[in-house]
Amino acid sequence: MMKSAVKRFFRHSVLAGLVLTGSASLAHAQGTSYEQLQTFSGILNQIRLNYVDSVTYTQLVRSAIDGVLASLDPHSYFLPREQGMRSMAYEAGELAGTGLIVSEVEGLPTIQAVLPESPAAKAGISAGDRLIRVNDTVVVGMTSQSLQGRLIGERGKRVRLALQRGQRWEPDSLRVTVKFDYLEPHAVTNVRMVNQITGYLRLQQFYLKAPEEVEDALKKLRSAGATRVIFDLRGNPGGIVRSAVDIASVFFPKGTTVFSTEGRRKSASQQFTTENDGRYRDLPLIVLIDEGSASASEALTGSLQDHDRALIMGRRSFGKALMQRAFEVPPAGDLVWLTVGHVLTPSGRFIQRRYQGLNATQYYANAGEGGAEQDTTAVFHTDAGRLVRGGGGIVPDIALPGRTPLPVWFSVAADSGFTDAIADSLAGTLPADDAGKQRFMGAVASWQTALVAPFLDRVRQRLHVAADPDSSLRARLGRILASRTVEVRWGSDAQEQFQLSVDADVQAALPYFARMDELLKHP
């Protein structure tokens, strides 16, 4: 009886201790900062003394730092000195890259953008593909900053990538080998005339020299006879904020508000305005955006929309309006990138998607979507009185449908050289003159018989898959294979011309120039 009573007392005491511990912790959570640090130090010590596996303080502290920053927002992060040095070496041209820009989506590192003509683009990797392994390392759960460091290396060396594509619950898998190569960081990647009066300008990213490249491109288009321009920001992940202000200055009169920032510290609260009359302030402008247009792209687009300066077309943008700043952390010289301000459009819109109460996985999963209902209920007005909303990214004035996704077997086929083999064999049979080029570029039906049909036959025979695409995918395959054929037979300049001629968004934009005055006025 005595032993039973002791056992019952012990059990009750343990339960009481658990309850009291919980209550004490709740009270302790409201203590001073010093007490909180004592608690943290005590937990580290208990782990060091009692945890079953060996762990170092470095591992524990680094995990704690990452956890603290992740609890703030999805864009604040810690960058160890060695990673920072590696990034600087890449930007200085001392290391080569793959051409991949990676972010986290639904808990997996996901390809946000693929630089044109890069090794990754030639391997058939597409935006939206999910990265699972780099060489023999599983990268699920790794921060995009850490992962980006694994995607740069010495020129000529190769990296093996394992990726997934399609539905999360029923994905297709692919493996490709990509060779590191030097990538010249051009901000403007395509400048040409779409027709006799319409120029086209693609801005890939907001690098330091982006404003200079944009002005040079516009000057070139003007000289070629452009009286109106399509400004392509699709897939542009942002970059240097100052570059966005300087590019906006090209299109606005002096003293125009581009955007403003608001932060806790006075130094983070600032209004950015144009300092000179823009040389192209009267140039009719259509801007293309999509779910990959983020950060500085959205700040520039929001300014052009709020001032009724351009017609915005495409798909809802990513939804990032947070400004980060780097702070050095002694003693090793590590960096912490902290969100220090909110970016507001001229009308006062804060187009950042909601992140409070969401983990990074949930946050990135909503790219290009409005998010919660309250994200887009705040109503604002442009200079002309048109209604626009805050939260959830920039909603285009004219919505356009998205592209047909590519199946995983296409990337396997591209990495295996099937696309090049089919297109190159046809290219050798085509006449090299300009008339032959024009005939081929307009012969849409012949692409299916001369390119798509033999390509699908090879895919079925070599990869042993059904490869039975619908009409929409067949049309896209035809455009891809025809583009390669044009490049091989008539060169890269002809290929860029061809790609514009079959770009659905670009072609959809052309008729809207005639309606811009009507559409940009108060309804």
Image (cartoon, rainbow, N blue to C red):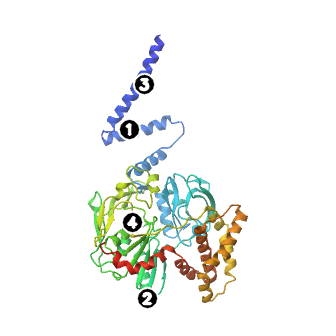
CB-based contact (under 8 Å), mark 4 and mark 1: no
Q: CA distance from mark 4 to mark 3?
A: 57 Å
Q: CA distance from mark 1 to mark 3?
A: 21 Å
Helix, strand or loop at mark 3 = helix
The outermost residue toward the right is: 461
Foreground disc of the pair 2, 4: 4
Q: Position of residue 33 (x, y in %)?
A: 32, 42
Residue tagged by mark 2?
Answer: 223
Residue tagged by mark 1?
Answer: 39
Q: Earlier in the sequence, mark 2 or mark 3?
A: 3
Q: Position of residue 382 (x, y in %)?
A: 30, 70
Residue 14 numbered tag: 3
CB-based contact (under 8 Å), mark 2 and mark 1: no
Residue tagged by mark 4?
Answer: 395
Q: Position of residue 125 (x, y in %)?
A: 58, 65
Above or below — where is 360 with respect to 383?
Answer: above
